[in-house]
Amino acid sequence: MKWIKAQWRETLAHLDLPLLLIVCVLSGIGLASIYSATASDGFWKLDRQIINMLGAAAVMLTVARTPPQTMMRYAVPLYVLGVVLLVAVALFGIVVNGSRRWISLIVVRIQPSEIMKVAMPMMLAWYFHKHESVLRARHYATAALLLAVPVVFILKQPDLGTSLLIIAAGFFVIFFAGLPWKVMFALAAALGAALPMVWTMLHDYQRRRVMTLLDPTSDPLGAGYHIIQSTIAIGSGGTLGKGWLNGTQTHLEFIPEKHTDFIFAVFSEEWGLLGNGVLLILFTLLVGRGLMISAAAPTMFSRLLAGAVTLTLFIYAFVNMGMVSGILPVVGVPLPFISYGGTALITLMLGVGILMSIHTHRMLVKK
């Protein structure tokens, strides 16, 4: 009994209360929205999401107690494991709905690209920490290569949404490591010049998503249906919304994927502009707290990792809200802590655990 109490006190000592409060409020909003979106199907999805949250919370608490030095030791093995599993997916992966993203390992089926969401920023943070005193152009080039290897495999699956998140996480590490602005402008110009070639390399469904973004009404019952119905739901919420469980677009089954990728449309219809404002404030506080933790981190590894994790959370929220609102293509990115799902939630909670670990261990980390 004493051991359990000691372990519980130790766990509580490694929690960042502001961060924990924000995540709990967002998770509560998520449960309420999932219940509203799936009320006609019974409680089983809500029950499963509660189980997902408990499992993800356990991961967060475990990681929060793990010192950043330990994370740094596992950065390279985790990255190598992720790349090996991505190669295995390319060779032996399971095809689901036309995409080869999963691999069976004895009794479980995993999606290795989810591992890279964490392994990539950890690997690059470790690399720049190792070469902190002698950073040259070749180090940034090597970091770009380390980033490109898993991204190529993930794009081949194809999984554009996950690849964009991993690219963003890796870029944030490289940016925080001191990538010169002139290099970033040159890369932006090169990307702009390469867009015609990139367009030819996209899959047909990816090109349709871009064209649908430009004109959803060109295929209102096909590719444009998702965007049209989600924007109708957001607009119909007005200023104050229709009230919880009273969303007509939601409960008349017009909104597709309403409990996962398009749950923001459900929330917007029921809580309106006011609710969206509260949601934006919560995500702003989450990102702000993460950046404060990054700024106070004592080592380059901790600083780069915290900054990348924080801005990746921002990208999750920005891309999801943007695609549901019709200003970005649909890429299948969940709304953090609100969308239904277990794998993404565990990844997000793991990121929060990393931030808590960096914050609470900052006085113990040796430079």
Image (tube, rainbow, N blue to C red):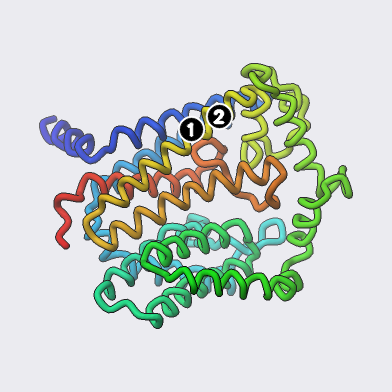
Q: Are marks 1 and 2 in contact (CB under 8 Å)?
A: yes
- Report whether 78 appears left or right of 4: right
| Spot occupied by residue 51 in the image (x, y as percentages of width and height) | 45, 34
Q: Residue at x 65, y 64 (%)?
A: 158
Helix, strand or loop at mark 1:
helix
Residue 66, compared with residue 135, is above or below; it is above
| Amino acid, disc 1 | Ile
| Residue 241 falls in image quadrant | top right
Q: Which of the image's four quarters has the N terminus?
A: top left
Nearest the viewer among 12 and 219 is 219
Any part of residue 92 in sight: no
Q: Provide the residue designation for mark 2.
A: 277
Q: Residue furthest bottom?
A: 138
| Spot occupied by residue 183 in the image (x, y as percentages of width and height) | 49, 74
Q: Residue at x 22, y 34 (%)?
A: 12
| Spot occupied by residue 197 in the image (x, y as percentages of width and height) | 72, 75
Neighbourhood count class around disc 1 (C-alpha, 10 Å): few under 14, some 14–19, many 20 upward = few
Nearest the viewer among 339 and 53 is 339
- Report whether 311 appears left or right of 205: left
Residue 186, compared with residue 67, is above or below; it is below
Q: Which of the image's four quarters has the C terminus?
A: bottom left
- Report whether 344 appears left or right of 15: right
Q: Provide the residue designation for mark 1.
A: 281
Q: Residue at x 52, y 63 (%)?
A: 167
Residue 217, compared with residue 96, is above or below; it is above
Nearest the viewer among 307 and 270 is 307
| Amino acid, disc 2 | Gly
Helix, strand or loop at mark 2:
helix
Q: Residue furthest left?
A: 2
Neighbourhood count class around disc 2 (C-alpha, 10 Å): few under 14, some 14–19, many 20 upward = few
Q: CA distance from mark 1 to mark 2?
A: 6 Å
